[in-house]
Image (tube, rainbow, N blue to C red):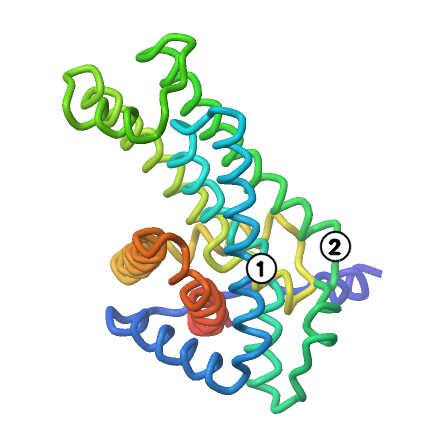
Amino acid sequence: MTETSETLVPPAPQVNALKMEDPWTWLAKGWADIKRSPLPSLIYGIVFVAAGAAITGGLWWLGLDSVIPAAAASFALVGPVLAIGLYEISRRHERGAEVSLSGILKARPPSLVQFGFVAFFLMFGILVWMRIATLLVALFLGSTYPPLPEFMAFLVSTKAGLSMLVIGSITGGVIAFFIYALSVVSMPLLLERDVDGVTAIISSFNTVRKNFAPMMLWAWLIASLIALGFVTAGIGLIVIFPLLGHATWHAYRAALK
């Protein structure tokens, strides 16, 4: 009975040793995936940007301009959950299988419950960050939410604004690090293997812990590319989001065995 039970439990993934040049390789492989399947990849990017624009427009309409920067960062952090179809494209490329838009939309992890479990923790971290951001606005600006240009001027030209910027950046950085460590390889892992959510989270944290330097480079590349996308008013994210999604699949394949 014991032997049978043990065979039903999939082994925990083992973390591979990574090199500093590996993140650049993941980006190159991600770009190759886009070139092989440009239509489904770019459709993903367009939908991602459209959703972000809708959220931004809603905040603007509600007069919550000053929350837009924090909301934009939060929307970027939820990317690992939204990119499941991009992981599926890369997985099909590896297997030499056909890639179709309908097939990608039907991509499902072995356990939706476990995928949802990790997604819940990811969303919880983002909600915590959004709550902290709104509390900081209330602390430094009272009950008013100034237009975004005035808010940005307040941040960079006043002592209170600079204090808010420092506190918000440190707090956001800590939360972003833990969300990154939780999700950097857990989502593609849950797509491919029938493991529980706790195992996926631990495997993701161990990947960062055991390969800290290359995984911090990967985090920097992700942040830099997303920032570039925002600088282009979100247009660049049409390509950057699928690029990072595909590259994340290759990061997972390199990091775990």
Of all residues, the one furthest to the right in this rendering is: 1
Indicate whether 18 appears above or below 158: below
Q: Which image quarter: residue 210?
A: bottom left
Q: Is 60 left or right of 82, judged from the image as shown? A: left
Residue 210 seen anywhere in this rendered image of the structure: no
The residue depicted at 70 percent of the width and 63 percent of the height is 109
Horizontal and vertical percent for residue 24?
A: 29, 73
| Frontmost residue, 137 versus 3 | 137
Horizontal and vertical percent for residue 13?
A: 54, 64
In the rendered structure, find residue 112 and report the number of the disc placed on it.
2
Q: Which image quarter: residue 158?
A: top left
The residue depicted at 29 percent of the width and 60 percent of the height is 221
* Image quadrant containing the N terminus: bottom right
Indicate whether 51 appears above or below 71: below
Of all residues, the one furthest to the top in this rendering is: 142
Q: Which image quarter: residue 101?
A: bottom right
In the rendered structure, find residue 47 and report the number of the disc placed on it.
1
Residue 217 seen anywhere in this rendered image of the structure: yes
The residue depicted at 29 percent of the width and 30 percent of the height is 149
Dot 1 lies on which element? helix
Eye-nearest disc, 1 or 2: 1
Dot 2 lies on which element? helix
Q: Is 116 left or right of 148, judged from the image as shown? A: right
- Asked if the residue at tag 2 contacts the one at tag 1, i.e. Cβ–Cβ closer than 8 Å, the answer is no
Indicate whether 174 appears above or below 115: above
Indicate whether 148 appears above or below 213: above
Of all residues, the one furthest to the bottom in this rendering is: 96
Q: Could you classify mark 2 by the number of other residues whose Cα lies within 10 Å: few (under 14), some (14-19), or many (20 or more)?
A: few
Alpha carbon distance from label 1 to label 2: 22 Å
